[in-house]
Amino acid sequence: MAFPADYRYTKEHEWIKVDGNQATIGITDYAQNSLGDIVFVELPKVGEELTAGKTFGSVESVKAVSELYAPASGKVVAINESLATAPEKINSDAHGSWMLRIQLKDAGEVSKLLSSDDYDKYVKEEGGQ
C-alpha cells in the first residue's frame, strides 16, 4: 500500500492533510482494507469542535463498527456530504474520499503525527502488507 507523503497519519489509521490553516481528514487505505465494505459513516456537524485524540464519529462496515479519532483539534468547516449516500467511495479511494475539513486550532499537533514512512512501518509491524 502507498501512503501519500504530504499527509500525516495516526496509529488509529486516520490521515490528515494540511492546507494553510485548514486540514482535511479521512481514513487510510489500510483502514478501509481492514474494515471491508463500508456501509455507513457517521460524521460530526459543521461547527462542532474536535479535540485531538478524541472520537468524532464512526465507520460501519460489513465486518465491524470502528470509532474515528481526530488527528488534530479544530472546528469542523465542511463534511463530505456524498458519503451519506455513497460511503463505499472510501473503499475505492480512501485517500481521495475525505470525510471532513477543519479549521486547525494548533498546527503544531499535526507535526507530532506519523510521516508516511513511519506509518508504513507501523502498519507492517501491526500485520499489514
Image (tube, helix red, strand yellow):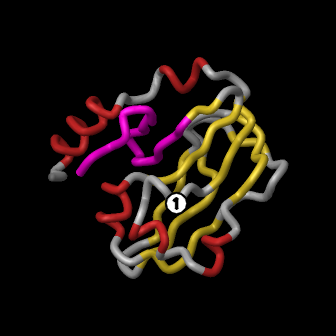
Query: Residue lying farthest right?
Result: 47
Q: Is residue 105 above or below residue 69?
A: above
Where residue 46 appears, as percent x and y from the top left, is: 81, 54
Residue at 56% in and 63% down: 58
Return the x and y of residue 62 as percentages of the image width and height: 39, 81
Residues packed near mark 1 inside 10 Å, few (<14), some (14 to 19) or many (20 plus): many
Residue position marked by numbered label 1 in the rendering: 97
What residue is rendered at 70% in x and 58% in y?
A: 79
The boundaries of the magenta stretch are 1-17
Residue drawn at (63%, 37%) of the image: 23
Residue 68 left/right relative to 81: left
Q: Is residue 49 left or right of residue 72?
A: right
Position of residue 59 measured from the top left corner of the image (x, y, whole percent): 51, 67
**Secondary structure under badge 1?**
loop
Asked if the stretch drawn in magenta spans residue 110, the answer is: no
Based on the displayed image, in which of its 4 quarters is residue 40 positioned? bottom right
Q: To which quarter of the image does residue 114 belong?
A: top left
* 37 with respect to 59 (left or right): left
* Residue under the image location 35 percent in, 56 percent down: 29
Front in this rendered view, residue 19 or 102? 19
Which of the 4 image quadrants contains residue 51?
A: top right
Most common SS among magenta residues:
loop
Q: Is residue 7 covered in magenta? A: yes
Identify the amino acid type marked 1: Ser
